[in-house]
Image (cartoon, grey):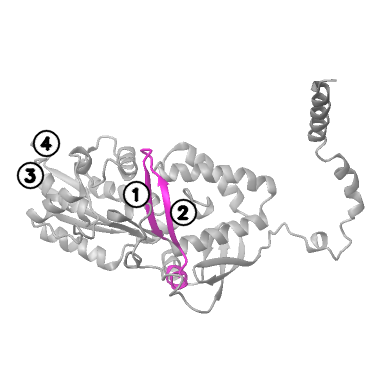
Amino acid sequence: MSQTTVPSAGNKKVLLVYSGGLDTSICIPLMRQEYGYREVVTVTVDVGQSREDIAQAQEKARILGTEHYTVDAREEFIAQYCWPAVRANGDYQGYPMSTSIARPLIAAKAVEVAKRLGVSSFAHGCTGKGNDQYRIEFAIRTLLPTAVIHAPIRERNLTRSWEIEYAQQNNVPIQQSLAKIWSVDENLWGRSIEGGRLEEPDFAPPEEIFQWTRSPQEAESLPVQLTVEFAGGVPVAIDESPAKLVERMNEVAGLHGIGRIDIMEDRMMGLKVRENYECPAATVFLKAHKALENLVLTRDEIRCKAWVDQEWSRLAYEGLWWDPLKGDLEAFIASTQQRVTGEVTLRFFKGQVTVVGRRSPWALYSESLASFDTTDFDQRESTGSVKNFGLQSRFYSDQARRNQARAQPQ
């Protein structure tokens, strides 16, 4: 392992952004043994992990002798991070972003704790191959420019196998083994599973990696219809908080096998990696939201917003939550979402979610004009526009034929 500069006498406490997993857990002894810190503060931010994972993180922190804090950010995560993602149809290469949009909030809460404790040194367990190193460090440096940040896994070029052996040698409690080496990241908006043989593009993932969704074969045998209500572009429910609404939808959609995604993903480093996701609620809400937008927005708004949504998703994927362009894009998005109010009815069955109906007071649909059985739209008035439609394209075709004829030998 490489040599590390020992902190000065006045800088003996470091705050570790702590998930309780293998990478962050081995950072605790590494901070003491290799980085020279006497005190390690661990901060776990609850963005919807399982209660078991939160409890395990707290217990591991106790066993490893850290000063530990757990921050409940579930409601803030949904209201301030997931709902903006819905309004922007947040999607990266075909899956709803979950891990990426949680990282800025996790880092922000860690900075809040650090400021309260007077700590300016941070550590995290991100690898040098992944995206989270960018997201976590951008957020910390944006919110605390004087921060010193350590990334032991990246700085020491560590492998997962080495980490497991190091953990065993240092009595660090872990769940991974050399046989089951995959890593899970979970929040209310989604669950990602990677590592081990799951990295192989042609390896069929075992059923045991899935916790939120049934397989389509084992899903409920009868379809169900459910109506989602939106106000200002976000889902709403009477007497339910945003987090509770997402939790309930995860349960219902998961029973019907909705939200499993297996893709090849292009990371920020340029690496192409295989990822498995479970995101039942996110899949449902995003599909319903786009269906409602298509009912209430104009054709040009939909066309322009597709580009805006794509750029917003890129910035969110990269963790650039406080980038000025993101704020500019959100101003446009906010203007369009004033009319994204109404209801969408969905059908769940065997891994599929289908839109079967939508309605809104802002609908741009007119039955009297669109129906084939009415005469409110005078079809005869289309004659002139149809005759002149594609005029330049027709001119081009005529010119091409004439030029081709001239080029033929006589």
Is residue 363 in the magenta section? no
User: Mark 4 or 2, which is nearer the eye?
Assistant: 2
In the image, residue 343 lies at what x, y percent? 61, 66
Q: Amino acid at mark 3?
A: Gln
Specify start and end residues of the magenta stretch as a single range.
Answer: 249-278
Q: Nearer the viewer, residue 149 or 129?
A: 129
Q: Earlier in the sequence, mark 4 or mark 3?
A: 4
Specify the label residue 33 is tagged with: 3
Alpha carbon distance from label 2 to label 1: 17 Å
Q: Nearer the viewer, residue 131 or 75?
A: 131
In-image side of 152 versus 89 (left or right): left
Specify the label residue 7 is tagged with: 4
Q: Amino acid at mark 4?
A: Pro
User: Mark 2 or 3, which is nearer the eye?
Assistant: 2
User: Mark 4 or 3, which is nearer the eye?
Assistant: 3
Task: Residue at the far right: name it.
Answer: 380
In-image side of 152 versus 206 (left or right): left
Q: Amino acid at mark 2?
A: Tyr
Specify the label residue 215 is tagged with: none
Specify the quadrant of the image occupied by residue 212. bottom left
> Label 3's element?
helix
In the image, residue 323 lies at what x, y percent? 43, 38
In-image side of 8 versus 225 (left or right): left
Label 4: few (<14), some (14–19) or many (≥20) C-alpha neighbours in 10 Å:
some
Q: Which residue is mark 2?
A: 95
In the image, residue 14 lies at what x, y percent? 16, 44
Alpha carbon distance from label 1 to label 4: 26 Å
Task: Residue at the far front: name it.
Answer: 410
Label 3: few (<14), some (14–19) or many (≥20) C-alpha neighbours in 10 Å:
few
